[in-house]
Image: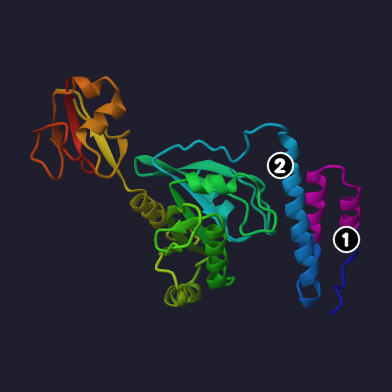
Amino acid sequence: MPANLPPPYFEAEKRYKEGKTAEEKVEALEEMLMIMPKHKGTDKLRADLRRRIAKHKMEGQQKKSPGKRETAYNIEKEGAAQAIIIGPPNSGKSSLVAALTNANPEIADFPHSTWNPMPGMAPFENIQFQLVDTPPVPTEFQAPGLSDLLRRTDIIVILLDIHGDPLQQIDDTISYLQSLRIYPEWVSVPADLQKRPFIKNVMVAVNKVDNDADEEDFGAFIDLCQFPCECIGLSILSGYNLDGFLRKLYQMAKVIRVYTKAPGKEPELKSPFVLPLDSTLEDLAELIHKDFVTKLKFAKVWGASTFGGQMVQRDYMLRDGDVVEIHI
């Protein structure tokens, strides 16, 4: 089947050939990809354009910081937990980060519009999560640093597109992670793996569940999916289940919120201390100030598992929502 490319395509192709920088070439290639009609006769050409886009984006990243070890992927963790959003092109990663955070990633109808990771802070009740948008995976040209970012993060979110082939998408993404020795908690690690694996909390989110028909397709995906994964359907377009997405992040982060108060004063309920599950009073004291650990005598706790103002010792296991009055 002939490609039947329109004249504007060849104008963009000319700009691509004349482009002096990686950014100029990528811009022209992405325009060519948008202009090109979608049918079997253009499948190979579209794939070639996507490969060239990824290649030039890689070149652009390498030229921006020659000789430096610091890259766009050296993102310091902030908030209660860091969640890296990965998935296939046009699944809505950038839109999800833009909808829930203060970040402004580039959003486009064509694939590979994300060059570098983009972090943003998503508020949930009285804490925040750091969400990080990333280039699509898997891809032939993978940006250096993404594997390390994925290995260091607290949670990996695989974002799928219900209008695509989500079963194939999740298979491809899990295979990509395994190629980096990253295994979700719910995937068996091969016994003959030569190097140590990285076991991660991984959530699967399926985007574009915009109506009843999409909801049925999501249900079919759940029935057919071979992975016993944490999965949630959502719609960035309508806002459906975005609160549920953040609540599931909170559950997967395995953290608790603890509040403090001074004797005779009301507790500070707007800015809790965030600690891992199973943290003790001693852990809280150290988080507040390193000197508190040695000076700590006891604390009074108001919470669901104690009576009001119960006196506890340093080995007391904190619970989510506890109000603590430390005495040194």
Residue 32 on image: x %, y %:
81, 59
Closer mark to the observer between disc 1 and disc 2: 2
Considering every residue shown, the one lying at the far bottom of the view is 1
State the predominant SS element of the stretch in magenta: helix
Taking depth in this image into account, of 195 and 36 the one nearest to the observer is: 195
Is residue 29 covered in magenta?
yes
**Which of the 4 quarters of the picture holds residue 21?**
top right
Indicate the position of residue 90 as horizontal and vertical percent values: 62, 60
**Horizontally, is 70 left or right of 14 in the view?**
left
Task: Kindly identify the amino acid type of the residue bearing the numbered disc 1.
Answer: Pro
| Res 8 label | 1
- In the rendered image, the quadrant that contains the C terminus is top left
On the image, numbered disc 2 is attached to which residue?
A: 61
Direction from residue 61 to residue 237 in the image, left or right: left
Tell which of 321 and 284 is nearer to you.
284
Magenta range: 11-32
Q: Residue at x 34, y 40 (%)?
A: 126
Query: Residue at image x 22%, y 37%?
Result: 280
SS at badge 2:
helix
Residue at 44%, 50% in the rendered image? 155
Magenta span contains residue 125: no
